[in-house]
Amino acid sequence: MKTIGIQGIAYDDKSSFLKGAAKAPAAIRKTLHSGSSNYFTELGINIDTPQIADHGDFEVEEYFDIESITRDNLNKTNRLLTLGGDHSITYPVVKAISQSHGALEILHLDAHSDLYHQFEGDPYSHACPFARIMEEGLATRLVQVGVRALTDHQREQIAKFKVEVHEMRNLRSLFELQFNGPLYLSLDMDVFDPAFAPGVSHHEPGGLSPREALNIIQRLASPMVGADVVEYNPLRDQSEITASLAAKMMREILGKMLAA
Ligand code: MN
Ligand code: MN
């Protein structure tokens, strides 16, 4: 039975700095299926299984079409991994997922808090999705890891929405996070140090290593009902190094979803 779906959202209209993330879903899939690696996760789960359905990539005209696309795909498989796209996609995706699963706990890995009330006049900018999610009560808890570019405004938003932030400067290398309810994981590829992931629009040095992120994800014990991998920008990549990291993270996340 197919229980987990993959959807690609080819959308970067809400990127404030550089375009290119719309090309990510196709590039990540290509790398995943290139034969350069296999389909087993490090924890021994085979993601090449009929339990996973790939719903394909979707072109988006209007921002809120992302919500209806996600709802359609949730009707086929009630848990979803979304390939972005810029980070603006997370708000409409989480909106649809919370309608089927109830308010979520969210683990958000990112160099940025993405909590701006509005950015350059747009409340739906890729700098804003978590402000919208928290305002609407779509999450009971937001835990951010790897953040290292906070402004005064974002610190105020963190206090206002009671976000649990593990700033990069304070991070211990082995990291265990406890969640209780249905979990949504949002992975912005710029959480990684640009040395490991040059293919992102916003380079913010001093970030996570792939091993640190894998440790965090592999230790999660709560059932993961949804996840996204966003902000990969193939136009900035070198030797597809970031594509291979995104594909590996996709594999490990799918393995976690299957194991739940
Ligand atoms: Mn982000
Ligand atoms: Mn970011």
Image: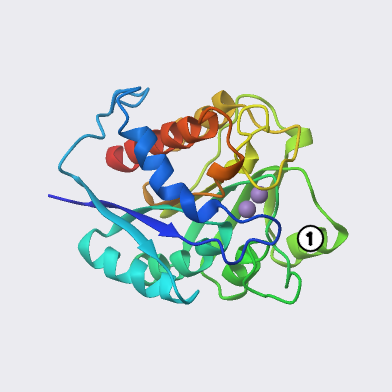
Q: In which quarter of the image is the C terminus?
A: top left
User: Is 203 in front, or is 40?
Assistant: 203
Q: Which residue is drawn at 56% across and 52% down?
A: 20
In x, y percent, where is residue 89? 51, 63
Mark 1 Cα within 10 Å, few/some/many (few <14, many 20+)?
A: some
Q: In the image, 234: left or right of 209? A: left
Residue 30 seen anywhere in this rendered image of the structure:
yes
Colour mapping:
rainbow
Eyeballing the image, is 44 above or below 182? above
- Residue 122, by quadrant, is bottom right
In x, y percent, where is residue 114? 68, 59
In x, y percent, where is residue 96? 40, 70
User: Is 71 in front, or is 105?
Assistant: 71
The residue that label 1 is drawn on is 154
Q: In the image, 144: left or right of 176? A: right
User: Is 228 in front, or is 259?
Assistant: 228
- Residue 130, by quadrant, is bottom right
Kind of residue at disc 1: Gln
